[in-house]
Image (cartoon, coloured by chain):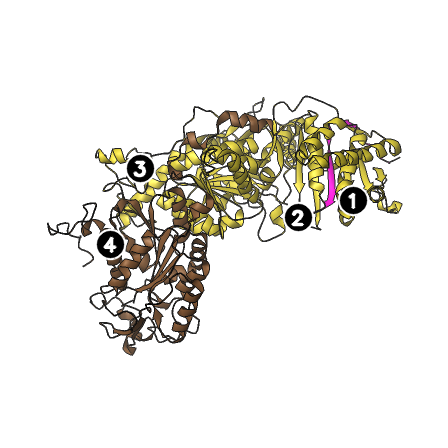
Chain colours: A brown, B yellow
Amino acid sequence: MTYLAKPKFHHPELPKNALGYTHRDYEGTVSTLCAGCGHDSITGAIIQACFELSIEPHRVAKISGIGCSSKTPTYFLGNSHGFNSVHGRMPSVLTGANLANRDLIYLGVSGDGDSASIGFGQFAHAIRRGVNMAYIVENNGVYGLTKGQFSATADRGSKSKRGVTNTDNSIDLAAIALQLGATFVARSFSGDKQQLIPIIKAAIAHKGAAFIDVISPCVAFNNHAGSTKSFDFVREHNEAVNRLDFMPSRMPIEIKYEAGTVEVVEQHDGSKLALRKLAADYELNDRTAALGFLQQQAAKGQIVTGLLYVDADAEDLHAHLKTVDVPLNALTEKDLCPGQSALDKINAGLR
Amino acid sequence: MPTATPISRVNDFVIRFANVNGSGSASANEMFARAVMRMGVPVAPRNIFPSNIQGLPTWYEVRVSEAGHMGARGGTDFMVAMNPQTFDKDIAGIEPGGYLFYDSTKPYPASKFRDDITVIGMPLTAICNREYTDPRQRQLFKNIIYIGALTALLDMDVKVVEQLIGEQYKGKDKLIGPNIKALHIGRDYAILNLQCPIGLRLKNADKVGDRIFIEGNNAAALGAVYGGATVCAWYPITPSSSLADAFTRHCAKLRVDPATGQAKYAIIQAEDELASIGMVIGAGWNGARAFTATSGPGISLMQEFIGLSYFAEIPAVIFDVQRAGPSTGMPTRTQQCDVISCAYASHGDTKHVLLFPEDPTESFEFGALAFDLADRLQTPIFVMLDLDIGMNHHLSKPFVWDDAKAYDRGKVMTAEELEAGKEFGRYLDVDGDGIPYRTYPGTHPTKGSFFTRGTSRDRYAKYTEEGAPYVDNMQRLMRKFDTAKDLVPRPLIANSGKPTKYGVIYYGSTAPAMDEAIAMIEGRGHALDRMRIRAFPFHSSVNSFVADHDFVFVVEQNRDAQLRSLIVNECAIDPARLMPILHYDGTPITARFIDKAIGEHLDKLKVKTMKVTS
């Protein structure tokens, strides 16, 4: 129903947050993604997280790269400025924006193609620098907009919709983020809002580079058995390249599970996902242990989700650069221009 | 006695130092150039250096010209040959009647030398070995010793050099004495053992005035400080790195809050040029004045982002310090070879604003102006320096700033205006100049937000893939580019005293050589009107200048006549009317080259005309 304008009316008694805004005030335009896309669930989680945090919507800058995931900032926070930038380059644009105005909240939205392939370098360096941001990767292991190529997060041995086996090793963005010094690292699942919303809230509240890898199945191109992002593999779809515009109409995936247990979730289309809830004694502030744990569980074929690491005392890039408290974009010629008297001295020193 | 008459000139010659890279010669040679300036004699030094830290040949050329010719001249009158690797070639480059100064510790056979030059040998290595035991000192003081010898050979004011040594080592005072001692070791040896002075002399004059001595990169960086840049993102690349370094130094002095020690700027050394320009665009989008400094290869890498900046209409300033390319080697040589790649940078239909400073003074002025233009036009602005302007010291007019001047932040709608109900359409041409209003992120809770994209949007920034809104937007961008024609620095015209059918167009670092060449061309009996282009898009006076002449020479430092192509393309001019004069071997263009190329061409025309009339 993407051609329909979103209706503006709403229930008069919708709950309001501390600022008097309802959930609707955090929405954007109607999604143009495939019905049932995991990304729409993440959009919903971001809306809910911002509503619950009582953030002024216009104080968020939402920045993305290119791809299905990078389209989503249009679908939430309609009163925020958004920037659909260049493929793989969200981190640099966000870094620059953050330098210009330290007072806004920076939400970076990216995908696995955007961050693990073309933008792997920018992902790494923005994390290294400790840019104050919530960096969300909507990770489906596949290129959606170009119709189903493997991305760099697709696991070795997994099969594409066209039946090709991936022979390249996969990149675990959460593990890399840990290694690069991210001060907040989490992984979640688009179908698990109960887990995801609090993680997003915590990431926004975190001062420093917060990274969230959200597994978000692609209902159009990675929804078959043989894929590690979606267990159901339907062989006849591999051949259906000419029917690609036909999308199954499905509801977003929702699951619930108990702490300390592994859940095998059967998605509504029949694909499965093994999810392991972290043990209660998991140490949140041990970077090396977190890395080891991620790798051990990955070897068993399990996907670790939850908040993996946090440094509560993190410093951000502005602290490293010792920039003024006032946003740089608010400084005027009075603050910035040393004037003719300083120039006279400079001239004198050059003779 | 040499077979050619030894050159005898006062305050008008070229001295060239041939050294080994990394031997510490550069600072001694620069001190020599400064001493000439301090004597009130205009001087133009040029560092010709390899892509190397230690070991390869390097030259430092000092043009002394009381008449004020600051372009490269070509040829060498006095060669200080300190590099055995290039000894033969260096000797071959001396003008007939010129002078060779060399280290005579190891004797050379007479066949090594030419019989039409004056050969001056001084056992520098032997002197250093006698005076110093530390090998590093032997090397470093050798440079000061030959400067000392030069003061005697050229009859210089030695006090000036002593004073410079004092200034150079201010704060490291224990180095002053040994350096002055070395200076006098060289000077005394020369006075006692060599024929002093030679035919080339330096005499005190008063032709420098209030001019300053600075590199273009340093000046451009200062321009960025004065222009209000707060964000600098860059990636190291010769010959632009010193621009970012200078910005860092200037900011540390001029932009730190004395009370809190906090910085009113942010400088990021990015992971590559893509990230540099991405950060600049992010900061520009968010209302800060931001720039990057790079060279041709960086421009190539930035192409996609430059297009986004053009279409999404985000202010950005790019300093392109041009060099020959690609890869290593020629990158330490100068060229004007990025004109087209910047003017039409990126995919889709794009056109960009370029500024062409001629020297450090204009690098400062345009460096500051670029930020006003970027905000006013909401587009990338390129400041096109080159290695010659950027990395060499030039004697330039002092910097001037109007303290009453306010920054032009362009069309930015405020929260108050939005609140008052003023209509906001991000890509709406309300004033007919093609420039829309923008809002900074975070301005108003419910009004003025928009989603930034490349092309797929209408006048209100709403997503659309329809053809008509795309065309509408592209037409508006053209109107905006037309608006730029009257905002950028205008071309400067210098008409010949006599009416003439011929003109010349030139730009950037060609200016000093052109200024000198014009007198030489006039000396051949020709008249030539001159136009120095200072920006693209071209002002309408470029069309009329070409129209007013039978044909116009276009002098450039690249192979493909890039500015000429731009003129042909943008002004719809018959290419036959624009005669390319091209210099692109990596050395700065010289007056001799221009005089020969243009002068000989005009000589032929003159001969033809006479034949017709006879």
**Residue of label 4:** A47
Are the residues under marks 1 and 2 on the same chain?
Answer: yes
Judged by depth in the image, the label closer to the viewer, 4 or 2, is 4
Whole-number angstrom distance, CA of label 4 to CA of label 3: 29 Å
Q: Chain of mark 1?
A: B
Whole-number angstrom distance, CA of label 3 to CA of label 1: 65 Å
Are the residues under marks 4 and 2 on the same chain?
Answer: no
Horizontal side, residue B215 vs residue A36: left or right: right
| Residue B510 at x, y percent in the picture | 59, 36
Relative to residue B65, is residue A15 depicted above or below?
A: below
**Residue of label 3:** B437
**Is residue B5 on the magenta stretch?**
yes
Q: Secondary structure at mark 3?
A: loop
Q: Identify the magenta region.
A: B1-22
**Residue of label 1:** B138
Whole-number angstrom distance, CA of label 1 to CA of label 2: 23 Å
In the image, B592 versus A68, the foreground residue is: A68
Q: Which label's residue is closer to the chain start, 3 or 1? A: 1
Whole-number angstrom distance, CA of label 4 to CA of label 2: 57 Å
Whole-number angstrom distance, CA of label 3 to CA of label 2: 48 Å
Q: Chain of mark 4?
A: A
How many labels, in total? 4
| Residue A301 at x, y percent in the picture | 37, 75
* Mark 1 Cα-neighbour bin, 10 Å: few <14, some 14–19, many ≥20: some
The quadrant of the rendering that contains the N terminus of chain B is top right
Relative to residue A321, is residue B260 depicted above or below?
A: above
Q: Which label's residue is closer to the chain start, 3 or 2? A: 2
Residue type, mark 3 in image = Tyr
The quadrant of the rendering that contains the C terminus of chain B is top right
Residue type, mark 1 in image = Arg
**Residue of label 2:** B50
Residue B356 visible to the viewer: no
